[in-house]
Image: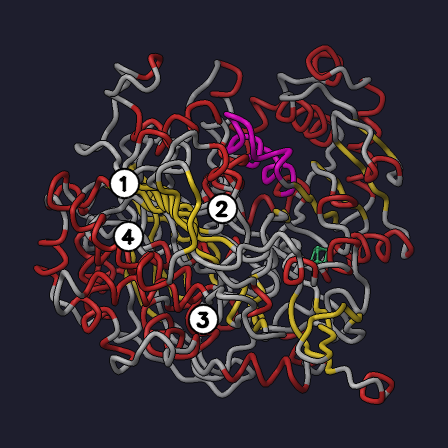
Amino acid sequence: EQAEQEGVRLVKTICTGCAVGCGILGKVKDDVFIGIEPWVNHPINRGKLCCKGATVNHIVTSPKRLRYPMIKRNGKWERISWEEALDIIARKMIEIRQKYGPDAIFFAGSAKVSTEVAYLMRKFMAFWGSNNIDHQARICHSTTVAGLGNTWGYGAMTNNFNDMRNARCIIFFSNPAEAHPVSFYHIYEAKRRGAVLICCDPRFSRTAAVSDLHLQFRPGTDIALVWGICYEIIKNGWYDEEFIKNRTYGFEKAKEIIMQYPPELVEDITGVPAEKIRKAAYILATHRPATLQYAMGGTQHEYGAQNIRAYAILQLLLGNAGKPGGGVNAFRGHDNVQGATDMCVLSHSLPAYYGLSEKAWKHWCNVWKVDYEWIKSRFASEEMMHKKGFTMARFAVGAVAGTDAYPGTRNMKIDQPAPLKMIFIWGHSTPSLGDLKLVKKAFETVELLVFVDPFVESGAAMADRDDGIILLPAATEFEGEGFVTNSGRQIQWRNRVVEPLYESKEDMWILLSLVKALDRYEAGLYEKFTINFGNKSPEEIRPEDVWDNEVTVGCRSIGMIGQKSWRIKRQQEYDYTFDPETCRAVGGPCDGEYWGLPWPCWNEKHPGTPILYRNDIPVWEGGHDFRVKWGTTAPDGASLLSGVNGHDQIPGWATNLETDYSEWLDKNMVPSGRGRARFYAWNMKDPVPVHREPIFSPRLDLVDKYPVYDDSVYGEYHYRVQIRARSYQVAWKNARLKEVFPLIWTSGRQVEH
Ligand code: SF4
């Protein structure tokens, strides 16, 4: 009311400051974004904001905004029109393509764009004919994917922010008090309810300051610390025997390794007094469920994936998986890094983790309504179509290798035929790229450098060159709209607060206009690209067109969430909460406070999955699962072992289908009742995992074969089965770390084999 009286419009939207996904009210007066008000009934933050969120409107009103497209010519920056800028870029792209092939371009996408734009970025590079696309997720949480993905199936947070208040103990391998401040609201609530906080951090951080126990270990000794805690838990018989028996494999093997790490030895390795290690183990044993929380402190190591795996093993040991207040909660960084990852702005996969296999390409060609042969013809070769492109970590090498630009890399081997001649940096901060000396050289070596950003990206200033740089002013997140996925897998709709300022344009418009500009030289490209959107102009295509027409069709469990994007919008607009009964049915995390549509979401009515890998769903009783003839052997000698069933359990991990097991499954699987099954598979001839790549990672979708309908709260059920090989993609760094690998732990049910 007061706002109204003051002529202020309040717009519900989502903070861009980090991956917590707090709701904010943008205050708009006379079309100016003048400030932020708390959104008091938003379930994540309930009106709380950190200093970043409370001032986040400044990204719109900052005087440092890039106002119009600019080009550097003869050492001087000049203002140019959008049309000219896009035409120069398109012409250069075509020239490079003709001279060097499609792989001479690298496209750094972004975790700051909406999920729809992220999806279109991946589609764009597919249509261009290269897998040279990547984004921030490669730098931050790729080890989470390897560590958690190999344990459970999803490389994502198992529970959600709200659920942390249900924990009786929280063990941190991070510093959320500073990095994800509002998450601490829920952590404080847990503490108020009696939870004990254990902070594992080499630094005395703000999180350590409010924790009950601080384990200040030497950097890089996470695994030893975890093993020391596990040692005590096993020695004293504090592990969850029932859970281990029913839901895991390989305990004996794990025990063998863990028991080599008594606290005294761990003290030598980590610097943490043995007494404190014992105390941590005791607290964890006596305060269940406990949740484990980590972020970049755990991931950004050469052996980050092993760190994450060790964290997961600790939680499996305690039986803290698949339940409210438990889990392994990876806090991600950017506001939409989860959405951009799901859309696979990544060099090794097509959207929704399909990988780059022929079947994956065929699937997406089908969604995109283009001929597979046409897409193939866009690539330098069929081999390149299936080959991983440059990553964020390697693209700079791709630009300078083989040149005189950087002596150290002159003989560096690159795995792409064409050295890079053009680089797009779209919503990505150059200083985050690591080896800046090399990146600078790369920026100075390529023929054209394009930055798309609301600000003048520091890389543009860093590159010491007189021409060949174009800056395109992107609108900020608050000047556009679309879906974003927070770290808790919860998809939210971000409303536009104000119209784009100056000459800035929304990312979607920029991308579509670039395709349109290319269309002048490659007739028919725009029509092909937008066929599902009715060939509308860049101005007319809205996020819903992309989501409802393609993402939903192509991304299965992720897409189902938006299969009528109005569903999320409506929910956000009017009512965030489900009734407690529904809440309980999906895991009951928060006394009826559960909100949103966290993926996976299996159909239009499914309320989402706030807690993954639930272990309260009966496996064999109640007719919830597929029945598998245990221990049977697949045609190539691989043994398929079923994991837990339950409607929440299937990994959304739709990767390559190298081997078609449908026939075999038809014979060996009997659907019984409702639910979905989850499978892990590995080659039993070679039980010690030495495979860096999946042996096979098939996606089998049996929706058509076993449709089952159910009128429960979940609505219609789809049976789908995915089989995924356990992949061990992590580098083997030293003997001690190698020991992490032989553990074969999953949340799968133990079976005879
Ligand atoms: Fe924004 Fe993150 Fe702060 Fe929430 S915690 S207000 S999402 S920066």
Identify residue for label 3: 675
Q: Secondary structure at mark 3?
A: loop
Q: CA gap, disc 3 to disc 1? A: 34 Å
Relative to 3, does residue 727 appear above or below in the rendering? above
Instruction: Give the residue number, with chain letter if any, for mark 1.
Output: 388
Marks 3 and 1, the one that precedes in the sequence: 1
Range of residues picked out in magenta = 296-315
Secondary structure beneath label 4: helix
| Residue 577 visible at all | no
Residue 535 relative to residue 380: left or right: right
Residue 2 can be seen in this image? yes
Marks 4/1: CA–CA distance: 25 Å
- Secondary structure of the residue carrying tag 2 is loop
Splitting the image into four quadrants, where does ligand 1 fall?
A: bottom right
Mark 4, residue position: 89
On-image quarter of the C terminus: top left
* Closer to the eye: label 4 or 1: 4
Residue 138, position as x, y percentages in the image: 45, 41
- The picture places residue 39, in percent across and down from the top left corner, at 77, 73
| Disc 4 residue type (three-letter) | Ile
Nearer the N terminus, badge 1 or badge 2?
A: 1
Residue where numbered disc 2 is placed: 428
